[in-house]
Amino acid sequence: MSTSESQPSLPRNLFPHQTPAAASSSTEETKDANGMTKLPNGVILDKDGKPCRLCTSAASWRNLTKQAKAQGATSTPATTKPTPESTTSTSTPQPRDDCPPDVEALGRSTWTFLHSLTASYPVQATQEQQGEMRTFLKIFSRLYPCWVCADDFRNWMAEPSGRNEPRLKGRADFGTWMCEAHNEVNRKLGKKEFDCRFWEERWRTGWKDGRCD
């Protein structure tokens, strides 16, 4: 959500989550008490028990790939010298645009979409428009590709006091509500919160100083 030096940057993912117990802080091959191989720190499992790429950062996914390659190397004796392409580089790989998104890239794109959605929302929404948006948010919170992020969003909206229910009467309320949802993530990630008084300048009209013209 980067706008200027006074505004916070976009969070790295849509909604934060805890790393499952199967994760480990070590990227080396280790075994747990049951003899199962531990996963690198930050790797999130899908509901089928397999690593979820869309729920995991690119760095953690690379560590998982390195671990898998290392395990394969120990089980298969090397018979040829490594080629330059197979030599491990010590530099940090640069992100590519033609690879599947990780949880951070997915989150940044999603926030751009959601804030743009509020920016195009009617100043005063009809009952039909409110119903359509409420349905969309319910479906979105169930089908979002990162399932732990989706669960977190759904649970946040369903807060027992009702304070986080979508406010859909018009653009101003909806835009502020979405900003508050984003700030919930910023707080959990320890990031500076965005001043929701300026959400419309950031996502709809552009800043008054003309930097977006």
Image: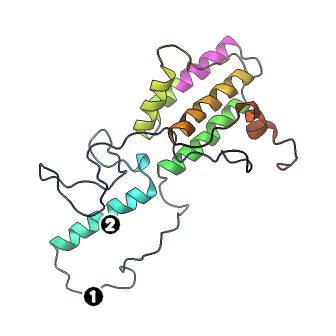
- Decide which of tag 2 and tag 1 comes sooner along the chain: 2
Residue 185 included in the magenta stretch of the image: no
Residue 124 included in the magenta stretch of the image: yes
At which x and y percent is residue 173?
70, 21
Q: In the picture, residue 191 is in which quadrant?
A: top right
At which x and y percent is residue 30?
20, 59
84 lies left or right of 92: left
Q: Which residue is mark 1?
A: 81
Colour scheme in the image? rainbow
**Does 135 appear above or below 192?**
above
Secondary structure of residue under mark 2: helix
Secondary structure of residue under mark 1: loop
Q: Amino acid at mark 1?
A: Lys
Between 193 and 125, the one nearer to me in the picture: 193
Tell me what residue is drawn at x 88 percent, y 47 percent.
210
**Does 147 appear above or below 10?**
above
Q: In the picture, residue 112 is in which quadrant?
A: top right
For marks 2 and 1, give the CA distance. Answer: 18 Å
- The circle on residue 66 is 2
Q: Which residues are magenta?
A: 123-137
Q: Amino acid at mark 2?
A: Lys
Q: Are there few (<14), some (14-19), or many (20+) residues within 10 Å of tag 2?
A: some
At which x and y percent is residue 46?
33, 42
Q: Are there few (<14), some (14-19), or many (20+) residues within 10 Å of tag 1?
A: few
